[in-house]
Image: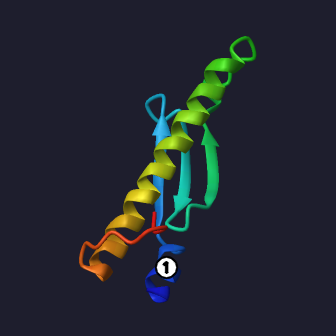
Amino acid sequence: MARVQEALKERVVEGSSGGGMVSVHVNGNMDLLSIKINPEAIDPKDAEMLEDLVLAAVKQGLERARELGKSELGRLTGGLSLPGMF
């Protein structure tokens, strides 16, 4: 199990929002690795929209990382649900 958890650190998923205007990379260890913002998404008069796009992309990236972890650990445990594991 420790080997799978270590391997998850190397697996990276992407979350995005606004049609790709904001994208994030998250590893299988749930670490946020990067945030990319298309310059067209930056409107000084509408910071709230950009904040919403970043939040949505981060949420999607974290959910995809959580799903990756469940999938990888599920193969190891044969689908058993273990408390505290994702």
Q: Is residue 17 left or right of residue 79?
A: right
Residue 12, relative to residue 57: is it above or below?
A: below
Indicate left or right for 40 with 72 as reference. right
Q: How is the image coloured?
A: rainbow
- Quadrant for the C terminus in the image: bottom left
Q: Residue furthest front?
A: 83
Neighbours of disc 1 within 10 Å: few (<14), some (14-19), many (20+):
some
Residue lying at the far right of the rendered structure: 44
Q: Is residue 45 above or below residue 3?
A: above
Q: Nearer the viewer, residue 10 or 1?
A: 1
Could you say which quadrant of the image residue 45 lies in? top right
State the quadrant of the N terminus: bottom left
Q: Residue at x 53, y 32 (%)?
A: 21
User: Residue 82 vs residue 15: left or right?
Assistant: left
| 63 shown above or below 85 | above
Residue located farthest toward the top when viewing the structure as drawn: 45
> Of helix, strand and loop, which one carries label 1?
helix
Q: Amino acid at mark 1?
A: Gln
Give the residue number, with chain letter if any, for mark 1: 5
Q: How many marks?
A: 1
The answer to whether 26 is drawn above or below residue 24 in the figure is below
- Residue shown at 30% from the left, 80% from the top: 77
Q: Spot the residue most to the left.
A: 78
**Where on the picture, by quarter, is residue 37?**
top right
Q: Residue at x 59, y 35 (%)?
A: 55
Place of residue 25 in the rendered image (x, y in percent of width and height, measured from the top left) = 55, 54
